[in-house]
Amino acid sequence: MEQILNEILSEPQFAEGSAWKRCWYHAGEKIIEKGELGSTLFFVEEGQVRVLGGAEIEGNKKINPGLCDMNAGSVFGDICLYGSHRRTASVVALTDVCILEIRSDMLSIYLDDHPVQGYLFLKAMFQVMVLRLELANDRIEKLLAWGLKAHDIDKYL
């Protein structure tokens, strides 16, 4: 992903300032908020970020568990790759970070105009999403097994 994205970002027709911008965040700063409308995706150039989920437990108590940490070379916010969508998670900087914020509308136009790079980008994005899906499925299975055992339901299966 990093290689093809760097190739795209270095193209003169995909210029910094109009198609993407470089942003810096200090450790602890929120980069995106779950539920807000977004139309950009992000590439971690330097540093580390944490993806936070949101859950409500007994008594309307809200918690924000860390879902995963991402290092330099990672992409997030890809739910907005093709249009504006609500963010599905919050992301905060764990360390001081440099993030590239990429306009999805400009990226879409570029990928349409450059089908080889478009194919390579979407192939890399698909590989990222497959890894995330495998991790999510594994976590769900383990959480389900834990819940069944914790509530003594496993003896009925």
Image: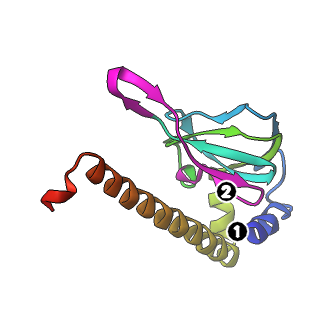
Q: Amino acid at mark 2?
A: Val
- Report the residue marked by disc 1: 1
- Asked if residue 117 is among those painted magenta in the image, a careful observer would answer no
Q: Amino acid at mark 1?
A: Met
Query: In the picture provided, is 81 more to the left or to the right than 60?
Result: right
Query: In the picture provided, is 47 more to the left or to the right than 34?
Result: right
- Tell me residue 69's x, y (percent): 65, 50
Dot 2, crowdedness within 10 Å: few (<14), some or many (≥20)? many
Q: Secondary structure at mark 2?
A: strand
Q: Which mark is residue 75?
A: 2
Query: In the picture provided, is 20 more to the left or to the right than 113?
Result: right
Residue span colored magenta: 55-79
- Asked if residue 56 is among those painted magenta in the image, a careful observer would answer yes
- Tell me residue 27's x, y (percent): 78, 35
Quarter containing the N terminus? bottom right
Q: CA distance from mark 1 to mark 2?
A: 8 Å
